[in-house]
Amino acid sequence: MAVKDLARGFKDSVWLGWKVDANWTDPWLFAIYSVIRPIAGMLIVIFLIFVGSQVGGYSDEKYLAYVFVGNTFFILVVQIMLSMGWVIHEDREHYEVLKYIYMSPASLYVYLLGRACSTALEALVSVVISLLFGVTVLRMPIDLLAVNYPALAVSVVIGLVAILSFGLILASVALLTARHSGGMVGEAVSGIFYLFCGIIFPISALPPWAQTLSKILPLTYWMNMVRNSMFGAKPTEIMQDLGVLAGFTAIFYLASLGVLKLADYMARNQGLIDITTEL
Amino acid sequence: MEYSVESRNVSRTFKKGKNEGIVRALDDISIKIRSGELFGLLGPNGAGKTTLIKIFCTLLLPSDGSAYVGGHDVVKEADSVRRIINMISGGETPGYGLLTVNENLWFFSQLYGMRGDVAKGRRKMLLDAVGLADQGNTRMNRLSSGMKQRLNVARGFMNDPEVIFLDEPTLGLDVISAKQIRGYIRNWVNTQPQKTVLLTTHYMAEADELCDRVGIIHEGRVVACDTPSNLKATVKNKTVFQFKVTGSGDYGKLSSIKGVAGLSWTHHIESDTSTLKVVLADQASASEVESALTGSGSRILSAETPEPTLEDVFIHLVGKGLQ
Amino acid sequence: MTAPVLSSYMERNLRTVVARTYVRVVGGFREPSWLIWDTILPMLSLSAYIYVYKVMNAPREFTGFVILGGAMISFWLNVLWSMAANLYWEKEIGNLEPFLIAPISRMAMLMGLAIGGIFNTTIRALGIVVAGILIFQVEFLVGDAFAALIVFVLTMIALYSLGMVFASLFLMYGREAWHMSHLLQEPIYFLSGFYFPVKYLPFWLQVAASAIPVTFGMDAIRRILILGEGFQSVSLHVIALALFSVVLFVMARWSLAYMEDMGRREGRLTLRWQ
């Protein structure tokens, strides 16, 4: 398939993803919705720290900043996982368009990637809003002037490739599962990253076997890079994590291609491309 | 109660969107259907057939006018209406994919409070009637789309309603299945004189075959309402010419010929020919029509005057075909 | 073949409740992948919160709070997605019309959904509790089992009545209602004290939280099952939950009728892809 066709397919998928996510209401209401959800998620964790410090006597501003940054950037992971857990079910059982997309010359991979990127763009906006809200309203101990923005940009871009690869694996698995599990799968899988990637607590708190798992998940290194960038670390302090992240990202990217191909074959073999469960 | 189904000056409008005006789906519809009648509502897509059915089925309120089913007002006595009706929408396949055919029918029977043994008996009879007797233990998501539609027909008759609304019930069915369903519907009304059917369709042959009376609806208005034979008689003093010509074209301009009351045409891609039906108020205009056809480059392969059909009636009343 | 005699209104509705419960429970077990996804995997994010408390040296019972909160969240999510949003799904797959023209109470249909949902979700919640006991050695000091049962039942009635109110919105609206459900997830997790007692929230937030029935249910269940307190300490919670149950049940009835009427008036009742 020509690159031009792939690019157009990608662009159209991004547009479609935006339309599906946003055209249910007025733009200003959508904006409010996009702000409230991530802020509410942030408040849960902030209050966990607050309550923990009240009852446990442990109080550390650095840890508060650690948790705030982790939780805020994790919005990218949750939203993409949730979206990719649902997109197949939505297109297959709700709008009943999946079979038509599937049997067209358009690449299913590019279509899913476009949908994921649409969510990623929306999630990035939520991240920025949450950061600004946290720093200005909740007075989180982050100095926005000290942030290493080039390093942060690199971290986010490479991290997004890793997250999108996971999202595509999730969508591939969704080809083989039923609608009523679709809603939870995305959130549940993002729970794996939430627990093992040092998002809201250092991985040293985990048992040894779990720490080993943490070290093979690319998002652990991504989180380190993001945090270090946010706290103004020098480039040399970020390079090691960058190398590991890039390597793992490449592996998971290739895995996403393989898993989609396998799921595609299995779904077609079992007649699942246009299944409905209707519970 | 004189009429089983009745509408009195029913109108229904919908808002198109923000600042986009309204659309008038039904305009002052008054129809009366007696108990035991199989009444057909014939019209093209978008004429308002489904909108009217939804009002009778209590799914939609009329904007103006009133409607009654079994003597009950569909607005004020919706619960009473629901006890005696059911509806089958063609092309729809309601049900739960992970449940079997038997389980789905049992489920819908429970919405009408049917006892287990009664539901079982009706289920067996209906599955037999729609040709699904051997599919009882098959999960619905494993049925073909035609089978799902036949299951939908069985579902509609489970509660043995006094009035059943059939909204294009054979839509998308294969010829044999459609014939089977029509046969069941006709038999149901014939053997139970107190039952009433309101059938909507855009297949004029179906309306002609099944219906005691037909209402022709166009752009939200009933333009005629009578028995099929009486309706066809209204074009008896008109001549219907059927031409078969080579190629295709925009034959709409033929309606400007004096004496042409209406026309419709269909292009057959495989043979690259077209069939034109022209309703003439004045038989003498036939030669003008022929000249216009040959003048446009078409060759007339055949010309005949078939017996008028309901489509001819529609063409005469509306000026164009049903499809 | 004799025509079926239409049974009484009560019998029709009872049969509807049973039938809809059957669909939810039996259908759910025919595609049992949710047992894994919905039971084990939520433990991951719960574990993350437990580790936060561990890092902060919080007392052991806070681990129990998180586990119990996770179990109760299952019910909240079931109310939002499997109950409230269900009418939306029924509409999209073409089941809503046959339901709406049947001579049944809409609440009977939703009640069947609720009972089936509670059954499936209880399995899910028990799975989370068992995992919490096995992995984190959570201790449950059951103060008064009977009080726990009363609190649980009243919380379920209040919660699922609230779900019926939400379901009515789905009769009229499509994706707006869908996104409203999304919007209610995290804020309710936060306000209702799923992961920490609401007494730690600022006063004005505690007042807001008291408008949510699950706040009382969560606090009461926590006191009885983790802190080993008795009926005395949750008597006010029981009164609040009972009031919520009555008010929300009545509101659900009104809301369903109102929304259905509005949907019929505006022609949106069976309109898809809104």
Image (cartoon, coloured by chain):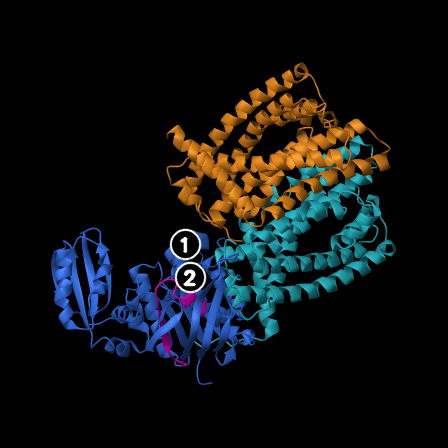
| Colour used to depict chain B in the structure image | blue
Q: What x and y, as percent, mark residue A90? A: 51, 46
Q: Earlier in the sequence, mark 2 or mark 1?
A: 1
- Mark 2 and mark 1 on one chain: yes
Q: Is residue B300 left or right of residue B109?
A: left
Residue contact at pointers 2 and 1, CB within 8 angstroms: yes
Residue name at image x 81 percent, y 61 percent: C239
Chain depicted in orange? A
Number of numbered discs on residues: 2
The answer to whether residue A17 shows anywhere in this view is yes
At which x and y percent is residue A193? 64, 32
- Asked if the magenta segment contains residue B40, the reply would be yes
- Which chain can be seen in cyan? C
Q: Secondary structure at mark 1?
A: loop
Residue hosting label 2: B151
What span is in magenta?
A: B33-52
Q: Residue at x 63, y 51 (%)?
A: C180
> Residue A99, position in %: x, y?
41, 44
**Which residue in the protein does label 1 denote?**
B143
